[in-house]
Amino acid sequence: MKKLFILSIFPIILGTSIYILFRNGNLLIFKWLEILRADYWVFNIRKYTIPMRGFFPKYIIYNVPDGLYIFAFTNFLLFMNNRLKWYQMIFVGSIPFIVFSISELFQYYNIISGTFDILDIIFYKIGFILALFINILIILRRQRNEIFY
């Protein structure tokens, strides 16, 4: 359960926190916060965080959250299917990367609303590769322990 939290839930919390604290206030997440009646305290916190946006590189605010989401979703899928072989892991783990990349391409061709950003695809790839690498290490460690113990 601790691995699930660290590798799946925490990255979603971190990515969403970056969105809430530093992104433009007209995103869909702010409508959700309004529905949940959490917008008041969030906008009070944002009074202090928005002026600090200039201290961070733009990719931290605009691209890292997307990479964190891919990392989290990939880890979640692999955690739920933790007895896969390495080649099955690549297939199952690539699903979030493929879906998010297709949505980015749809933005490029104006099929869905949004702003295409090649850095998003790069951070999707980084999140996918890191999640895959970590899960392969976990499986190798588990297999080693099964052999020697």
Image: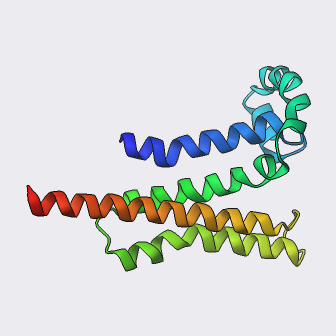
Residue 5: x and y in percent read 45, 41
Tell me if 144 is positioned left or right of 81 in this view: left
Query: Which residue lies at the image location 46% right of the left edge and 55% below the top edge?
Result: 76
Q: Give the image quarter of residue 87.
A: bottom left
Quarter of the figure with the N terminus: top left
Tell me if 39 is positioned left or right of 9 in this view: right
Query: Which residue lies at the image location 11% right of the left edge and 64% below the top edge?
Result: 147
Colouring mode (rainbow / by chain / secondary structure / one colour)? rainbow
- Number of residue marks: 0
Tell me if 86 is positioned left or right of 91 in this view: left
Tell which of 88 and 63 is nearer to you: 63
Tell me if 77 is positioned left or right of 22 in this view: left
Residue 33: x and y in percent read 76, 34
Query: Which residue lies at the image location 68% right of the left edge and 67% below the top edge?
Result: 100
Query: Which residue lies at the image location 70% right of the left edge and 50% below the top edge?
Result: 65
Q: Give the image quarter of residue 139.
A: bottom left
Query: Is residue 106 shown above or below 41?
Result: below
Tell which of 13 and 138 is nearer to you: 138
Query: Is residue 107 shown above or below 58?
Result: below
Tell which of 39 and 11 is nearer to you: 11
Tell which of 71 and 129 is nearer to you: 129
Query: Is residue 39 shown above or below 68?
Result: above
Query: Is residue 102 shown above or below 73?
Result: below
Quarter of the figure with the C terminus: bottom left
Residue 38: x and y in percent read 75, 26
